[in-house]
Image (cartoon, grey):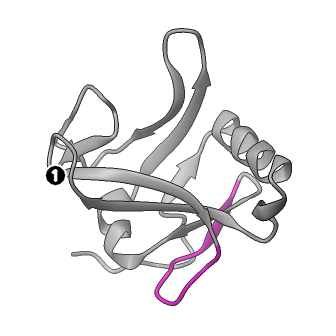
Amino acid sequence: MSTINQADPVVTLTESAAEEIRGMLERDPAGAGKGLRLFVEQGGCSGMQYGMEFATAKEGDLPFETQGVTVLVDAGSAAFLRGSVVDFSDSLNDSGFKIVNPNARRSCGCGKSFET
């Protein structure tokens, strides 16, 4: 496992993803002071699955800012997410957040689960 440098962002947000996240936080009064937590956990159809939630930083997080959004990733998830790009699409056929992960050997058609 490689060493995590806290100065380097673990993931990158596209402008469309950052814009959607900023808007969601602004529309929700409970979003004040929170960032986007990205994590990986066991589950899904390929063995590992992505999770996203709005949260405050906790001990062990690797917080960073990208595109004006605070992103929180725990050290365990960072090993799986390093180099990933989070995008957002609002098209009729394919809307929602998508994670492009260079560490995934195989991804499921649902886009939420992967295999390393």
- 59 to 28, vertically: above or below: below
Q: Is residue 36 left or right of residue 77?
A: right
Q: Residue at x 84, y 59 (%)?
A: 29
What is the quadrant of the N terminus in the image?
A: bottom left
Q: Is residue 115 left or right of residue 5?
A: left
Residue 64: % across, % down: 62, 70
Q: Which residue occupies the foreground of this view, 32 or 104?
A: 32
Task: Name the residue furthest top.
Answer: 92
How many marks are shown on the rendered structure?
A: 1
Magenta part mainly helix, strand or loop? loop
Residue displayed at 54% across by 30% down? 96
Q: x%, y% of residue 37?
A: 54, 63
Element type at marker 1? loop
Query: Left or right of 77: which side holds 114?
Result: left
Q: Is residue 16 above or below residue 115?
A: above
Q: Where is mark 1, residue-wise?
A: 116
Residue 108 in picture, x, y percent from top left: 22, 32
Q: Is residue 27 above or below residue 11?
A: above
Q: Is residue 48 above or below residue 8?
A: above
Where residue 89 sits: x, y (%)? 59, 24
| Residue at 31% over, 45% down | 102
Q: Is residue 70 magenta?
A: no
Mark 1: amino acid: Thr
Residue 82 image-quadrant placement:
bottom left
Residue 26 placement, left or right of 55:
right
Of 61 and 27, the residue lying toward us: 27
Q: Please identify the residue farthest to the bottom as the structure is shown.
A: 59
Q: Residue at x 72, y 51 (%)?
A: 67
Q: Which residues are magenta?
A: 56-66
